[in-house]
Amino acid sequence: MLNKILIDLRSDTVTKPTPAMRKAMAEAEVGDDVFLEDPTVNRLQEVVADLLGKEAALFVPSGTMGNQIAIRGLTQPGDEVICEADAHFLHYELGGIAALSGVHARTIRGVRGVITAEQIAALIRPAVYYMPTTKLIALENTHNRAGGAIFPVEEIQKIAALAKQHDLRLHLDGARLWNASAATGIPPHEYAHAFDSVSVCFSKGLGAPVGSALAGSREFIARARRIRKMFGGGMRQAGILAAAAIYALEHQRARLVEDHRNARRLAEGVADIPGLEIEHESVQTNIVIINIAQTRMEAATAVTALLQEGVGVVAFGLYVLRAVTHSEITGEDIESAVKVFRKVFLR
Ligand code: TLP
């Protein structure tokens, strides 16, 4: 790393466990989870199933594994998955759906990450023997590359009705579903209701060091448990990690609105700088996408220049930066970050 990052807006994954969370981890009762004997993992799975209104849940090491297990569990090789063109699993999961499930994607360019039932309906394959089988629709809420955009419940319901009509499965990448719920007040189970599988993360805005979960029917989760083991995700005394996740769910969800407030402040400050544009103007949650094309500075150069001033962001395209707010970013940090943006882009 070039310089010490003082204000780390690269991701909400950089958050470290707090002393209270570490205490919960240290005190966790544990057992061998491959033998289904870790009481804290079992409790976390119950808590998550309950929050998402599903019969069962499974603790997994990462959001990537949650998505990959779900897609493997809901498809057969050669099947087709319909998703938004900027879905996380298309960009950042190393082609896992092809490598691990033998499926491919048919994509739709959404508006702020939202694809409609109408758009999806146009892509569903007819039952012709020489065509792939459309099997799964995958949505993302909040949508990472669309700038933390929230997928509205009304559209999910329309998509669910379509899926039912065509006997398609539905998966939700809900890595940041907690942010959507905190922003709208709509409980997670309402967002999750129509889906066969939902993956959620504890290691992003909630601040746990590791871990995600997959939720669905009892039957689906039993299958998912076998796939998790096959993918090498069977963990032993994972209760130490599950304790952090339980702590995060109980204590860190309500405060996400502070991150959203800080993201809006950052967006306002940055949008004031000539040449910088906030791609998705109204920032809905904790992700800010900044287009710097007008400055003619490439994102990689900007990342280095900002880093030299102590501000960490990531490149999300040739002329696109992403900044993410989280529990370790204060209002003062946002003011300082805006000053650094001014310094870098107004020189
Ligand atoms: N996203 C990371 C990077 O991979 C981009 C980040 O910093 O935002 N689904 C969504 C919507 C995600 O944003 C992520 C992580 C994942 C899944 C994967 O989670 P992990 O990193 O736990 O495998």
Image: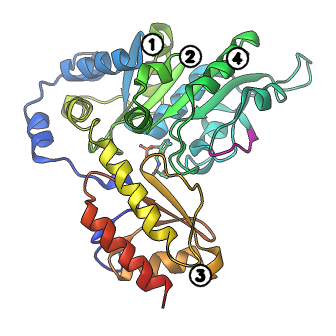
What kind of element bears circle 4? helix
- State the scheme by which the image is colored: rainbow
Amino acid at pointer 4: Ala
Query: What's the magenta region?
Result: 107-112
Mark nearer the N terminus (3 vs 4): 4
- Check the image and name the residue furthest to the bottom: 347
Mark nearer the N terminus (4 vs 1): 4
What kind of element bears circle 2? loop
Q: Residue at x 41, y 19 (%)?
A: 52
Q: Residue at x 52, y 47 (%)?
A: 144
Q: Which-is-in-front pick, marks 4 and 1?
A: 4
Residue 151 is a magenta residue: no
Between the residue at mark 3 and the residue at mark 4, the CA separation in whole angstroms equals 44 Å
Between the residue at mark 4 and the residue at mark 1, the CA separation in whole angstroms equals 23 Å
Find disc 3 in the rendering and name its residue: 297
What kind of element bears circle 1? helix
Find disc 4 in the rendering and name its residue: 163
Mark nearer the N terminus (3 vs 2): 2
Between the residue at mark 2 and the residue at mark 1, the CA separation in whole angstroms equals 19 Å
Disc 2 vs disc 4: Cβ atoms closer than 8 Å?
A: yes
**Residue closest to the eye, 49 or 92:** 49
Residue 145, horizontal then vertical, whole percent: 57, 51
Instruction: Using the image, tell me which numbered label, if any, was put on residue 194.
Output: 2
